């Protein structure tokens, strides 16, 4: 019989700093993918109308938005925010997925996989 290790909370709640860092990296990669082809096009079409430091300002604005997205992700990953997010349907879902092996919380932290032998045990998950 296979066993699954249970987590008391999602990894986002358990490691909010990592969640924020992953979000920052994702947004940064998206910003780079946007800026590399867009800067020359913007320069060519709007260069005469924009001030000299426009590219620096645009880069600073995008860097600010990346940092803001990381901060919001960090705040949303806090355990205190999970109650509110769950109420509006945006929670991590760990609490409601307890019917799936390997998800949610269980007694003792380990739950056998579902099956006929498992259903006879009190700490087993059912489908």
Image: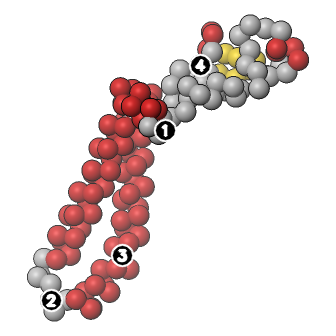
Q: Is residue 15 visible?
A: no
Pointer 4 or 3: first along the chain: 3
x%, y% of residue 2? Answer: 79, 22
* Numbered circle sitting on residue 89: 1
Q: Are marks 1 and 4 in contact (CB under 8 Å)?
A: no
Label placed on residue 36: 3
Q: Can you give x and y, in whole percent of width and height, for residue 32 in the image?
A: 37, 67
Query: In the image, which disc is placed on residue 49?
Result: 2
The residue shown at (32%, 50%) is 69
Mark 2 vs 3, N-terminal side? 3
Earlier along the polypeptide chain: callout 2 or callout 4? 2
Q: Residue at x 55, y 33 (%)?
A: 93
Mark 2 or 3: the one toward you: 2
Label 3 and label 1: CA atoms lie apart by: 37 Å
Left or right of residue 122, residue 73 in this image:
left
Nearer-the-camera pick, 89 or 64: 89
Mark in front: 1 vs 4 = 1
Among numbered discs 3 and 1, the one appearing first in the sequence: 3
Which residue is at 44% across, 32% downward?
87
Please name the residue shown 39% across and 31% down the image: 84
**Alpha carbon of mark 1 to alpha carbon of mark 4: how far?**
20 Å
Q: Which residue is mark 4?
A: 105
Q: Verify CB contact (< 8 Å) between mark 2 and mark 3.
A: no
User: Which numbered mark, 3 or 1, is in the foreground of this view?
Assistant: 1
Q: Are marks 1 and 2 in contact (CB under 8 Å)?
A: no
The x, y position of residue 62, in whole percent, is 27, 63
Viewer-side label of 1, 2:
1
SS at mark 2?
loop
Q: Nearer the viewer, residue 48 or 116?
A: 116
Quarter containing the C terminus? top right
């Amino acid at each position: 019989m296979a066993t699954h290790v249970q987590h008391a909370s999602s990894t986002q709640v358990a490691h909010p700093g990592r969640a924020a860092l992953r979000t920052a990296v994702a947004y940064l990669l998206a910003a780079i993918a946007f800026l590399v082809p867009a800067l020359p096009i913007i320069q060519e079409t709007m260069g005469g109308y924009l001030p000299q430091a426009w590219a620096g300002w645009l880069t600073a604005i995008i860097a600010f938005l990346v940092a803001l997205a990381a901060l919001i992700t960090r705040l949303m990953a806090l355990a205190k925010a999970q109650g509110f997010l769950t109420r509006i349907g945006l929670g991590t879902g760990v609490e409601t997925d307890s019917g799936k092996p390997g998800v949610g919380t269980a007694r003792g932290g380990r739950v056998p996989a579902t099956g006929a032998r498992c259903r006879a045990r009190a700490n087993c998950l059912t489908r």
